[in-house]
Image (spheres, helix red, strand yellow):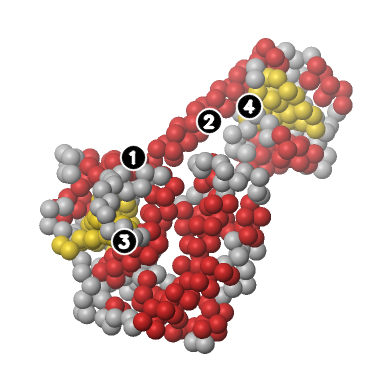
Amino acid sequence: MYNLMIVEDENKTRYSLKHYVPWKDWEIGDIFEAANGKQALDLAKEIVPDLVLTDIRMPEMDGVELAHRLHQDYPDIGVIMLSAYSDLTYLKSAMRTGAVDYLLKPIDMEELARAVRTAIGRIKAAEERNREKRLLARHLPELRERFFQRVLQNEYASDEEKAETSASLGFDPGEGRLRWRLVSFHFLTESSGGSPLGVLPQSSLTRRELLAVLQHAFRDFPRCEWITSRDSEWMALVADFPESAPSGVTGTSYTQSILDAVSAVREHFGIELSAKIGEEKTSFFRLSESVNDLKPVESDEAADPVRRAALDERQLSLVEEMKAYVKEHFPDDTMTVGDIAAHLNYTSAYVCMLFKKATGMTLNHYINLYRLRAAKELLRDPSLKLFEIATRVGYSNENYFSKVFKKYENMPPSEYARGMEPL
């Protein structure tokens, strides 16, 4: 059953419309009332009606303005307009609001029934479209990843077929502008035990966290798509502008980003990686040519100047002190890199450089990762409110916490929590 809001300034007419029309026969259940457009708009915010039957000429806000506002805010609401005046100007105005129909008083029951059926038909069609959109959104990451795999395996008959499929998945490969490279990460061993890893952790939440760390390393590139369905090897399809582009990420940034990713995964998860990279391709559809000619990425002086000099024991000790400070003070929302530097009696620039050199990630990034990891543990407790969790992990603003969480995890904390086992 659908609900209806009747908007009519004449009490007698409103009463008759509510009680003498066979609404239940037309799939209408609950019926709400409003005496003018302003009152109706306020009520709509609370109940979001399925259908609105509104008079046109009313005080405070007329039916045309009401229909226009409803169409802006709630495009799926079916609006049927009533008027005692056969006025062409009103008719044109009503149709521009997206109204289902325009009926003249006194109302003809057959015309009203036909208008209601039309409105409900539109609602059902919109519900089906929304259902399909939700279904596609739920499976879109898997479908896109499967598309990337098929491109790499050269399973499509033509570039036209690839282009058609990519468009249906909302993916624009940037033909003619971007240059693409294939990067492969192979998971080797666990640093702590040194034993063969074999497969990645099977927890979907852990895998999402791992992906977030890898994505962060490639954050400066215009595009980066991932294949993460394999147990021991993940692939990144990375796009950049040509070197001639003024805003392009060029030179050794691929190598640097890869090395940052390897260091960050080792630091944050205790997992060792090896990485390979393919030659640049002028077309996304040519990436399959890179699958069999990937070359190892290694740290050397030319490609990786940040890591040329080995850290001495004093520097390594300073890095550990930074981590210990974060561990102790992360719940304090006023903690800054400057606080850490002052605690160690060094400049902020030096501690940032040293931390990045040792771990492959920025100190601010490490702080966020530490706070979010603590937040994920708290999200397992359904009794805790989101603002309480945000406060406990060092974010004084709940909205900012949600924004940071979504940036790292590609989903809001509430959605993340639904996938976790409760304490």
> CA–CA distance between discs 2 and 3?
53 Å
In the picture, the disc for residue 85 is: none
Left or right side of 108 for 251: left
Q: Earlier in the sequence, mark 4 or mark 1?
A: 4
**Amino acid at circle 3:** Ser
Q: Is residue 83 visible?
A: no
Q: Nearer the viewer, mark 3 or mark 4?
A: 3
Q: Residues within 10 Å of mark 4 (few under 14, many from 20)?
A: many
Residue 63 or residue 155, whichever sits in front: 155
Marks 2 & 4, CB-CB < 8 Å contact: no
Question: Where's residue 54, x and y in %?
Answer: 73, 30
Tell me the quarter of the picture where residue 195 sits.
bottom left
In the picture, the disc for residue 191 is: 3
Q: Nearer the viewer, mark 2 or mark 1?
A: 1
Question: Where's residue 196, x and y in %?
Answer: 25, 52
Which residue has dot 4 on it? Answer: 101
Marks 4 & 1, CB-CB < 8 Å contact: no
Which residue has dot 2 on it? Answer: 126
> CA–CA distance between discs 2 and 1?
24 Å
Tell me the quarter of the picture where residue 241 sits.
bottom left
Which residue has dot 1 on it? Answer: 143
Q: Nearer the viewer, mark 3 or mark 1?
A: 3
Secondary structure category for the residue under label 4: strand
Secondary structure category for the residue under label 2: helix
Q: Earlier in the sequence, mark 2 or mark 3?
A: 2
> CA–CA distance between discs 4 and 1?
40 Å
